[in-house]
């Protein structure tokens, strides 16, 4: 990082976290703003809603691919160049989506758009790891998480508002403008945190070694414990997201107008827990808070399942919401700390490590969410049982594979 960007105390400036949060928010905006427009898009394209919904899956897949490829490239070429390439792909794909006239083209372009989004956002966690470590890294990630959680809350409202002003094309025009602003941010404001010497050394190495960092990650069992533990936590969240329309609107009879309020309550729980995490980091290590968060989530999911089995069809919305908000909120003190612990093992390949981390969340979350959805029985038992299974497995990963009760200092010196 250029010395003139450091403050008087030799630390990165405070504006860096909100800038990174704005770039990370590109993904929730790209996913959530157009969800209210899917029925209108289906009518405009002359297809069923389910066919348009494939564009959501294609985005998740493309985003994972973009992160897996973009991470190693950012270690080799630098953060800013990879972010610029990614935003360029995102901008071109978004512009083409505006003129898409069939669903197959829409799905393909959404995949390309997501690859660009993966390239652009993977640099954020890598920049944090380049500049911070330990408690400070977890604190910065918590700050970024706090600000970017606003995006999923605001995105559906933005999408609905744009639909009232125009048709579904207005939503992608908004995404195009946002991506152009992010291009300015990356090119003008964000610092390059990979030194020129490090880039030159990596560019001279054989191309086949570019992805060798993934092999290094898979040879570190403790790091994999944090990685897979967080992937299972993400699975718990995706189970909730995937089944939320059925749970609230069909099972509990919540109106479509009130559905965002129910969905947003869990986001508010996340915000509260993220703020709590920032304060806890002043006293405790990230790995200690991580274990508490995973234990809290497991207990909340257990309460969710017990409540579902005990009350059956007579279960009230309140009896479901209390443990659900607690289970989702606990992610706010799990994710920043698991990311900080995992990235602590890989200071020299932080881009590659962050790419695998981000991709694993989407892949595992999508698979587990879809798996539970396939066991649909018309009751809430598969939902609660699936969430409990993920939380138990995540805690076991943290305890017995990551050995989160032990310090990380030995691995950090390697």
Image: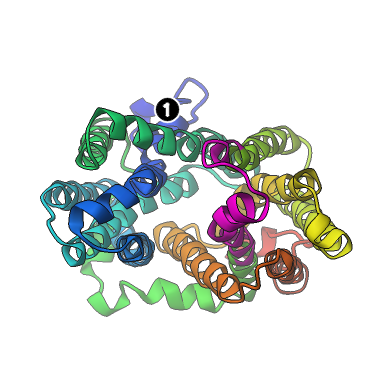
Question: Outermost residue toward the right?
Answer: 310
| Residue 194 in sight in this render | no
Q: Is residue 247 magenta?
A: yes
Query: How many circles with numbers are drawn on the protein?
Result: 1
Could you tell me residue 248's position as x and y percent? 62, 50
The one of 48 and 393 positioned closer to us in this rendering: 48
> Seen in the image, is 139 located left or right of residue 303?
left
Residue interval drawn in magenta: 232-261
Identify the element where label 1 is drawn: loop
| Residue 286 in sight in this render | yes
Could you tell me residue 124's position as x and y percent? 41, 46
Could you tell me residue 327's position as x and y percent? 73, 51
> Seen in the image, is 382 located left or right of residue 227?
right
Give the quarter of the figure containing the C terminus: bottom right
Q: Is residue 290 magenta?
A: no
> What's the residue at 58%, 57% (across, down)?
246
Give the quarter of the figure containing the N terminus: top left
> What's the residue at 15%, 47% (across, down)?
98
Give the quarter of the image for residue 371: bottom right
Residue 135 lies, with reference to residue 315, above or below; the image says above
> Seen in the image, is 361 located left or right of residue 176?
right
Where is mark 1, residue-wise? 6
The one of 245 and 208 positioned closer to us in this rendering: 245
The one of 393 and 240 positioned closer to us in this rendering: 240
- Main SS, magenta residues: helix
> Seen in the image, is 70 located left or right of residue 387?
left
> What's the residue at 41%, 71% (across, down)?
213
Residue 297 lies, with reference to residue 163, above or below; the image says below
Could you tell me residue 250's position as x and y percent? 60, 55
Residue 360 lies, with reference to residue 131, above or below; the image says below
Q: How is the image coloured?
A: rainbow
């Amino acid at each position: 990082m250029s010395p003139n960007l450091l403050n008087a105390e030799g630390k990165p400036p405070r504006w860096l976290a909100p800038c990174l949060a704005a770039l990370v928010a590109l993904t929730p905006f790209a996913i959530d703003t157009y969800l209210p427009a899917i029925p209108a898009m289906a009518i405009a394209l002359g297809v069923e809603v389910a066919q348009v919904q494939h564009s959501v899956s294609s985005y998740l897949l493309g985003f994972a691919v973009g992160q897996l490829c973009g991470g190693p490239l950012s270690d080799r070429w630098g953060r800013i160049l990879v972010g610029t390439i990614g935003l360029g792909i995102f901008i071109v794909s978004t512009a083409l989506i505006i003129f898409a006239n069939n669903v197959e083209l829409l799905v393909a372009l959404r995949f390309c758009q997501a690859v660009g989004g993966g390239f652009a956002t993977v640099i954020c966690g890598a920049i944090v790891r380049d500049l911070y470590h330990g408690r400070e890294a977890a604190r910065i990630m918590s700050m970024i998480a706090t600000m970017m959680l606003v995006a999923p809350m605001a995105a559906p409202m933005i999408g609905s508002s744009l639909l009232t002003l125009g048709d579904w094309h207005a939503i992608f025009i908004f995404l195009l403008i946002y991506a152009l602003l992010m291009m300015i941010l990356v090119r003008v404001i964000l610092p390059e945190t990979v030194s020129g010497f490090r880039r030159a050394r990596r560019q001279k190495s054989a191309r086949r070694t570019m992805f060798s960092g993934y092999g290094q990650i898979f040879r570190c069992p403790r790091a994999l414990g944090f990685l897979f533990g967080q992937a299972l936590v993400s699975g718990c969240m995706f189970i909730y997201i995937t089944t939320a329309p059925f749970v609230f609107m069909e099972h509990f009879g919540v109106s479509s107008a009130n559905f965002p309020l129910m969905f947003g309550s869990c986001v508010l729980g996340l915000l509260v827990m993220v703020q709590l995490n920032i304060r806890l980091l002043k006293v405790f290590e990230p790995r200690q808070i991580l274990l508490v968060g995973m234990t809290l989530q497991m207990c909340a999911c257990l309460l969710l399942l017990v409540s579902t089995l005990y009350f059956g069809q007579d279960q009230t919305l309140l009896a479901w919401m209390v443990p659900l908000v607690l289970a989702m909120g606990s992610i706010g003190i799990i994710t920043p700390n698991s990311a900080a612990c995992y990235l602590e093992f890989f200071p020299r390949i932080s881009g590659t490590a962050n790419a695998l981390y981000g991709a694993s969340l989407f892949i595992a979350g999508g698979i587990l969410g879809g798996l539970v959805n396939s066991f649909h029985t018309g009751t809430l038992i598969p939902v609660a049982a699936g969430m409990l299974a993920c939380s138990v497995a995540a805690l076991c990963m943290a305890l017995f594979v990551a050995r989160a009760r032990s310090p990380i200092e030995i691995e950090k010196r390697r």
